[in-house]
Image (tube, rainbow, N blue to C red):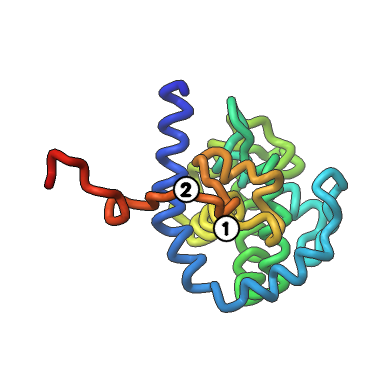
Amino acid sequence: MSGRERSRREFLVQALTGAGAAWAATNYGGIEEAAAFAWQSPPSGAPPTFAFFTAAQAADVEAMAAQIIPTDATPGAREARVIVFIDRILTTFEKDAQTDYTRGLAELGRQTHQMYPSAGAFSALPAPDQIAVLTAIEKSPFFNLVRTHTITGFFAAPVHGGNAGKVGWALVNYDDSLRHAPPFGYYDARPDSASR
């Protein structure tokens, strides 16, 4: 594994165990509702249909997510279909965040046009310009919300709409088979003869 892949993995694991894990723990009570809704989504190869976002809004949020977890030697947020996860949670247990997304996307549009007056939309900008816009808003609550949802959707169980093909789990070598062989931890291991 290259140094770049290792640092990316370390970043994502730290993010998962930090803000993403805290968000998931706080919102765990509504996950079953999101799961039931996600079962209705089209297969991973089909274009997604959105319950909350317009097509233009979905394109902008997906472009943001793709800059937060970009595609490089391994799949990123786009391949994990994080946008499907975010759309699903905004119509289930994160309904309270709908206004934050509506306002945040309007602000994203204003920032985009302020920096690039001829731009049609944030999602239409080339990657370096997208990064420049996101750098300008990275301290905002909206950017933090999208970042948290992106990371969570990248690692959530695929039934919730994101982590398509389990690409997030593959990146951190997470085995969801539950077929783990003992010993499971140091506390189960037999002491060797030297320690007796």
Residue occupying the point 31% across, 55% down: 188
Q: Nearer the viewer, residue 170 or 135?
A: 170
Instruction: Identify the residue under disc 1.
Output: 149
Q: Relative to residue 140, is residue 117 drawn left or right?
A: right
Relative to 193, say whether 18 is above or below: below
Instruction: Identify the residue under disc 2.
Output: 181
Near mark 1 (Cα within 10 A), the count class, few <14, some 14-19 or many ≥20, is: many
Q: Nearer the viewer, residue 98 or 175?
A: 175
Q: Given this view, does label 1 or label 2 mark the residue nearer the observer?
A: 2
Q: Which of 70 and 169 is in front in this view?
A: 169
Disc tally is 2
Q: Which mark is residue 129?
A: none
User: The residue under label 2 is which amino acid type?
Assistant: Ala
Between marks 1 and 2, how big is the CA–CA gap?
Answer: 33 Å
Q: Relative to residue 193, is residue 118 drawn left or right?
A: right
Q: Where is residue 85 in the image (x, y as percent from the top left)?
A: 68, 58
Residue occupying the point 69% across, 70% down: 34
